[in-house]
Image: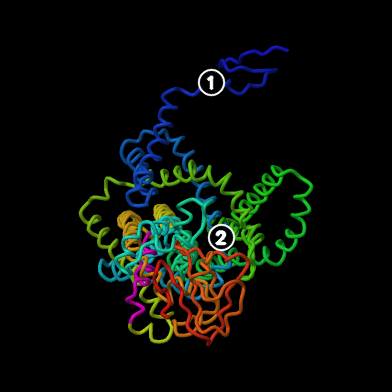
Amino acid sequence: MASSSSSSGAPTFNGQPLPPPYHESPLDALALLSATLLGIYSTGLLFDRLCYAGLVAQLLVGALLGPPLLNIWPSDWLTTFRMLGDVGILLLVFSGGLAVDARLLRKHLAPAVATALLGGMLPIVFALMFFGACLQFPWIQAFTAGAALSSTSFGTTLVALGQADPNRIERRLRRFHGHSLEDFSNFVENQGADSSSDTQSMLGPLRTRVGTVLVAAAMLDDVVGLLLLSIITALAQSPEPTSIFTFETLGKPALASMAILTIPPLLAVYAVRPLARRCVPWVIRRVSADAVVYGLLAWMMLALGGLVAVSDVVGTTRVLGSFSAGLFVNLVGAPLSLKEESPAMASFLENVFNRSLGRVNHWLMLPLFFLSMGTPLPITHMFHWSILWQGLAYSLLMILAKALVGPIILHLFSTRGNSSSTAYRSPPALFLGLGLVARGEVGIIMAQVAHAASLAMSWGDILDTHTYLVVMWAILVCTMVGPVAFARYARLTWGEVVAHGEWGLAAANAEGRVMDGQDAVAWVECARPSMERVSKEGPVDMGAAEQVHVVVNDDAMMASAGSSRLSLHEHVAPVAIEMNGMSAVPK
């Protein structure tokens, strides 16, 4: 049999056309793709160094090189960028659910939920006042504008938290307490030798009560934002304004979102997890390590694809399904009890994802997502005077809306006399508020979805182009200003934040009732205490001790001292916890 050519010149075989032969890509196309990747990596690194907001750089690259200005990419390239970016954002939200610490959420659930709800409500209230009352915009646009600024950027918050490391605040500690970090380097041995500097610097803030509440609230903030996105999407699909306040428009998306967030985690805990704990060890003993890794990746992707498809079918947003999929996988391997010390399975699952798909997502798909988000941004219109002043004014309101959350939460959740006079003015209050200012991917997604839906609506707009540009100004300003202000404040006041007895280091690992320093804390763990500095040593019951003196290491890592735990019972003598040469709880 011989091949031939058709009348059009295309090769055929047995009368059937053959696929086109392989040709090397043109050199100019390869150069353009390389320049694109170099541009988003270099500008992202620069913005990360300057203001911890690399995603803003990728947005600007998309706006400058895309259709709004230079328009250097062919249309099929933009379609490919958007498809890869959509996969990237699903993987990002999945990794967020995979990284949630269930024990941390249970431990500080009440203040974290209150922080997330208040942090989501105040931007909407301020937006209704600014757009609705002052500018006389339609209420639905004011609501959508506030909803887009309701979510805190979880990833950006973690990056900024890492800036509060002890090496950067040493000078502040010397001035505030008269001691330096060298004072107790003699009794801290080999702590975190195998950890990266970024991880070590982040663990200190995460071991304070205010730090754990901040991280938990940032995670829950994304969930609140995703629920609002589901409602906005349903509003955009309403055929007429009279059908907005119906079960089909508001009730069904809300119930579907709650079902997506609750049913898979319950199945993970009560059905899949017990089965996995029995079957996985049996499988691991009989197959190679590579087969285990590939099998786990396939299982994660099946969970992700399945719940994303279910979310689409039931009428909620796909990113909510991807978060639920990550939480589902997380809970299959995560310890449920606070007393369970070995989250090996959960850590292994997270490492498998981060070392494979996580790296590809970080270096390729996510930059392309934010690049594609910037391509429809009409940057040439953002500097019109009315949009500019409204955008900057709205940015200030959105910064204030989040910054107020910290003092309010500390006022509500501080015990005894602290709440009325000093708690809302203490360093942890502004630390918590500034940590919530940074916006990010969820706000961008919400604004883009609402604006795109408005262009196709027949009865009105939920976010017209003018309001959309004002919202984008606020997202850009908050994403750049928030992390810078938070990181600088953390470096300046970290010693005072740690020293705060109720919201600092002393209360970070306290269970039950939080004390004010005159009573004992329920229990505290310390990292390799010096025997000369601890009044009682070893695993010993401290119930009858006159005073308990615990020393923790310089970066506030409260690792277990061997296998021992210092048990401090209530209504015994005061507890003195020394941190960086200062008392974290008054003696």
- Alpha-carbon span between mark 2 and mark 1: 43 Å
Name the quadrant of the N terminus: top right
Give the residue displayed 33% in from the left and 83% down from the top: 421
Mark 2 vs 1: CB contact within 8 A: no
Residue 521 screen position, x and y as percent: 51, 79
- Specify the farthest residue to the left: 385
Residue 509 screen position, x and y as percent: 52, 72
Residue 433 screen position, x and y as percent: 36, 68
Q: Which residue is mark 2?
A: 315
Q: Nearer the viewer, residue 401 or 4?
A: 401
In the picture, measured across the screen, residue 103 lies left or right of residue 61, that is: right
Region of the chain picked out in magenta, as a range = 422-438
Give the residue displayed 36% in from the left and 67% down from the top: 495
Q: Which residue is mark 1?
A: 23
| Secondary structure of the residue carrying numbered label 1 | loop
Q: Looking at numbered disc 2 in the image, what kind of residue is underneath it?
A: Gly
In the picture, measured across the screen, residue 354 lies left or right of residue 463, that is: right
Q: Is residue 86 above or below residue 432?
A: above
- Quadrant of res 412: bottom left
Q: Main secondary structure of the magenta part?
A: helix
Q: Looking at numbered disc 1 in the image, what kind of residue is underneath it?
A: His
Mark positioned earlier in the residue sequence (2 or 1)? 1
Q: Nearer the viewer, residue 223 or 539?
A: 539
Q: 10 Å neighbourhood of mark 1: few (<14), some, or many (≥20)? A: few
Q: Is residue 86 visible?
A: yes
Residue 296 screen position, x and y as percent: 67, 49
Q: Is residue 456 visible?
A: no
| Secondary structure of the residue carrying numbered label 2 | loop
Give the residue displayed 46% in from the left and 60% down from the top: 186
Give the residue displayed 64% in from the left and 51% down from the top: 300
* Magenta residue check for 32: no
Q: Is residue 416 above or below residue 433?
A: below
